[in-house]
Image (tube, rainbow, N blue to C red):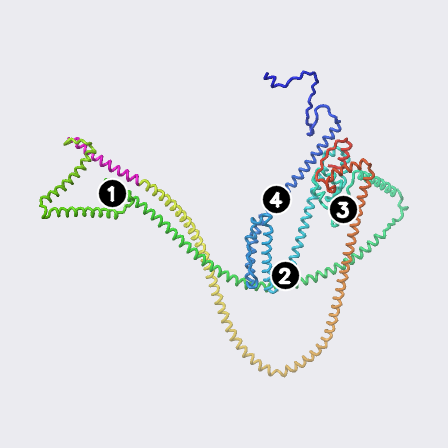
Amino acid sequence: MSELSRKRPHTDDGGVTVAKKRVLTGTNGTPQVNGHSDQTEDEQIFQGNLENFRKEAIYRRMKHYHRENERNIARIEELERRKTTCEAGLAAMTACWSQLLEAIRVFVKPDDMTRSNIQGKDVFNVVAHVDEESLPELHEALGKTATVTEALVNRLIQSGGSEQSLVFKKTYWEEFQGSQTELNDCMSEKERYHNELMGAENRLERVQSKTIDLVNPQKRKAASKVSTPKEGEGTTEDTERKPSSPSQGQSQSPTPGPEAPADAQLRVVLLPESVENWEKRIAELEIERDQLQKKLLEIPENQRGPLEVVIPPAFEKLGQANASLQIALDTAQQDLERVYQNREQWQQSVLAASAEVIESMRTMMLKRDAENARLREQRDQHFSELVERRQRDERKWAALVEFKELTQNQTERIAVLRSELARCKARLAANERQEDLLQFFLKGNPDEVQLINELRQQKADAEMRVQAAETTLSQLGGAEQPLDHEALVQARIDAEERVIKLSRELEGLKKVYGDVYQGILPPDVAKLNGQIKRQAEELERLNLLKVSLESSEGDLFKELEKLGSAWEMLGKQVESKVFDLHQMEEKVTKAVVEKARSENKYFATMREKEALEVEKKALVRAQEKGDKAVQDMSARVNEAEKTIRVLREEIHAVTKLKIDALKEKVQVTVYGAGIQAQLLKAESDLHNLKSANDRMRKRTDDDHRILRSKQAEWDLQRRQMEQQIERLKQEATTRHALHQGGSDNEVLQYMRTLVYCSTCKDKLRNVVITKCMHSAYCVSARTASTPG
């Protein structure tokens, strides 16, 4: 029954069992049905090729993603490196900026400019401003700092009295903005070129596809000869044949503007049929050319007439315009050279003026640098004195702290020694079987003064009792009572003392022998009795020692804890002393180095002193020579006075010479009048040349204006031609669509519904995956129209 319950029940009917068909997998990874299949062999081959085509498309897309991933990783690494360099640059910029502001505030008067609290650390804290939410705060702080810096620099420039620096600043700022715009243009060009490169790589991989070669190799070769369109010409055919590869650079990039090259804009997407027609037409034209060449060779040379070349009038007008423009260009180049020369002269004058201003500013800066150096020396001196005083106070404070710690350690050590002394005294009292002394020392008061005071108190009490007893005895031994009664009382007292002493001895014997005491003991028993007494005394002593040890055990643990803490503190002090010793060694080495430097400075100053002494000696010699020269000059003055007397005698001869000179002067003035006329003529010629130069400059400006207008006209014509070409392309595509049948229009409409978005009907889809289950002809036509 158990076997039957576990098995499937058997059917008794005579129905035919149907074998279950297993789903198998083909060589290319596609599912196949085991058994009869409705597909033909061609359809199966086509299905395999289609699967290979899809796999290749997916592989190409994965390769594209891999390339983009590697590019992004490299970009991230570059950004990380730039981040580290920017952080280092920000730290350096913080220090430089603060130092620059302090230096500028030294030059600017504090009354003229209000001091602002610039928090450089808060501004340049990169970790605090990493998030995007805190970026406005960073911009605000940087803007405040920049405005304050600009105000300080403007104030410094105004205090220097030079406005030319502001002009330079404005020009540099304009140049910086121009370079920034150029950088942005370069970055956009880089992105555009990257997108074009990605598109070219995708097209190259499609061209290298093996599946399309297997489907239709002839059309593949014809399509490979056709030039591919530029990245950014978003035609419908290009977008229809790129569903398996990324189309970001192709579908989203705009149409190139008028700044793009003309050959890039005149590229047209050519169909394989038009390529075949063009190849046929080219072959026919080559055959016709060969026939004409043969006919030309067959004609004799004597029958050949002169070749007449007919030049169209458009080319003649173009040549004349080109010649006139060439002349205008030459004149413009000459004017431009003159302008460059004038500009160089102006630049040299400006540089000379700026050099003078820089030299004056440099002298002023040197004076202020000297003043700043003096102020810095004073500041450094005061700072060094302050540091020295702080170090001295720190040393005093450290010595005071160490002294307090040592005092505390000594007090704890003294307490430990006192407790140890009390325990030793208690041990001695226990050894001597002095229970009262043991109890006294175990109380924790090992001071002998207290013990002496207690003994004195006991002695005073005993003396008082003795005195009271003596007074009673004296009263008893008076006249009222007889003397024998006093002797009896004394005898009674002695008897009571002996009774007390004997009772004590009896108690000791009872402790040893019990209650029964048998008269006189034999010698061996007496000896044994002595031993027992000694053992009893030893036992009493040991009990007292035990009590003292038990009472001192707690104190010992406390002392051990105190000693452990003191040991740790001592270790810390030793460690601090080791560090202090290391610091002292470093200070000693620094002192040695400073001593060597000071010795070097001393020797250098001594050498300078010797040089100054040598220079002083040379100056003394020069002074002596000057004194000798003064004496020589005095002698020469005397000789000159003598010569003056001689010259006064020769005045009459000189008057004659003056008359001759006046005559020559009159002749020179007549000649100078002619030279003045020539100078006036030269000035008038120069004025005429300047006016001609101004006219030529105006003419060149007019020519430049005409050239710019012609350039604008040519650009307008070029745009019109481009628009006409685009319109012709659209007309060609529409004519091609009209020549096809109605079925082709329906297929095109169906494909448009697949490619375009079903919601907005305007934008293309990023990815379109379709599976055609039609005939082999349909698939081959689709692969031929949309390769790879």
**Label 1 vs 3, first from the N-terminus:** 3
Q: Residue at x 67, y 62 (%)?
A: 347
Disc 2: which residue: 166
**Dot 1 and dot 3 residues touching (CB under 8 Å):** no
**Label 1 vs 4, first from the N-terminus:** 4
Q: Position of residue 206 (x, y in %)?
A: 72, 37
Q: Nearer the viewer, residue 126 or 666?
A: 126
Question: Which of label 1 and label 4 is nearer to you?
Answer: 1
How many angstroms separate mark 4 from mark 3 (CA)? Answer: 36 Å
Q: Residue at x 67, y 48 (%)?
A: 187
Residue type, numbered disc 1: Leu
How many angstroms separate mark 3 from mark 2 (CA)? Answer: 47 Å
**Dot 1 and dot 2 residues touching (CB under 8 Å):** no
**Residue range of the region highlighted in magenta in the rendering:** 522-551
Question: Does the magenta-highlighted stretch encompass residue 784?
Answer: no
Q: Nearer the viewer, residue 375 or 543?
A: 543
Disc 3: which residue: 265
Q: Badge 2, how many Cα within 10 Å: few under 14, some, many 20+?
A: some
**Dot 3 and dot 2 residues touching (CB under 8 Å):** no
- In the rendered structure, the answer to whether residue 121 lies left or right of residue 311 reads left
| Secondary structure at numbered mark 4 | helix
Residue type, numbered disc 4: Ile
How many angstroms separate mark 1 from mark 4 (CA)? Answer: 90 Å
Q: Badge 3, how many Cα within 10 Å: few under 14, some, many 20+?
A: some
Say which mark, if any, is on residue 76. Answer: 4
**Label 4 vs 3, first from the N-terminus:** 4
In the rendered view, would you say 249 is above or below 90? above
